[in-house]
Amino acid sequence: MTNAQLVPSSPGAVLKTASDSGLDVDASSLRRDDSGSDFVVYHCSDMSGQNWILRFPRRVEVAERVPAERRLLDLVRDYIRIPVPDWRVANEFLVAYPRLSGRLAAAEDPQTGLLTWAIDQSNPPEAYIDDLAATMAALHRVPTASVAAIGIPVRSPDDVKRSFADRLERGRHELKMHESWLDRGRRWLECDAWWPQSTVLIHGDLHPGHTLVDDTGHITGLLDWSDAEIGDPGTEFIECSRKFPAGTVDRLTRAYERHGGHLWTGLRENVREGIAFAPLTLGLMGLDTAQQRYIDRGNAALSVPTTIVAVDR
């Protein structure tokens, strides 16, 4: 099977794939959503009026991760109180689940990259911050052996650093990265205190576009667990906070600790550097998924010189 064979070529093909999986979709309700990098999504309802999300993998490697992600969703329900998708269909062609309640905290226009916010970006609600922190703390306590047993990737602290070093080299050669970014990245790699001493279960992409909220700012659902792994806990704080004001990190860490989460000494530096290098991650994702808009956004930020952060030794 090729990548081109995975995503249905027309609404009629979407309806047939859904029907073959036991879903009787109302053709007039189909609405395509191209904002995701791993799946093409259709919002729709069935003939009884139930709202559904249909996800079609864009690439073979994404389809291959579906079974492990389904097992992960079953596992995390026992640890977190925020609802996660209940996959009723999960195969190499289609993932389908009843739509969760709420609105995306931030919905991205796939053409412009602009976000439409359902919460106050300049001052995210306390309910939102507290729900994020409680969920992160609970996820980070999930026994790593249980996660490894279901086929989720496992990375050690050394793996985390090596992965960043590899991305830095790729950025140097494959993106329009100014030399100062390479110097800054090497400085980060040299400072062991800024890296975690242990790894935990992370969602991996816990930005506002993967959270659903109600009118009070409480989180009603956590979406898209494709990047979940045993990995760097700092990644959660980076993704949760990088689209909000700088003080959001402090609010998150205080709430996280209140909910029993463990903070290490260099976490804030880890988050600061991770946020700074977010364009590198974005640009490389664009290269890996052949999405030019992400490459362009990454290059736009990386081509500008950055300030090398001094390290206290």
Image: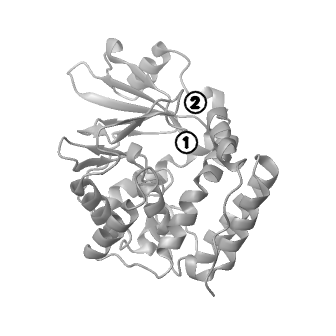
Callout 2 crowding tier (Cα within 10 Å): few <14, some 14–19, many ≥20: some
Q: State the residue at coordinates (49%, 50%).
A: 226
Please tell me the numbered disc located at residue 63. Answer: 1
- Which of marks 1 and 2 precedes in the sequence? 2
Q: State the residue at coordinates (57%, 44%).
A: 62
**Image location (x, y in percent) of residue 182:** 75, 62
Disc 1 is placed on an element classified as: helix
**Image location (x, y in percent) of residue 267:** 48, 74
Residue type marked 1: Ala
How many numbered discs? 2
Callout 1 crowding tier (Cα within 10 Å): few <14, some 14–19, many ≥20: many
**Image location (x, y in percent) of residue 263:** 40, 78
**In the figure, is residue 154 to the left or right of 137?**
right
**In the figure, is residue 34 to the left or right of 289?**
left
CB atoms of marks 2 and 1 within 8 Å: yes
**Location of mark 2 (residue):** 6
**Image location (x, y in percent) of residue 264:** 45, 81
Seen from the viewer's position, the closer of residues 301 and 111 is: 301
Q: State the residue at coordinates (62%, 52%).
A: 281
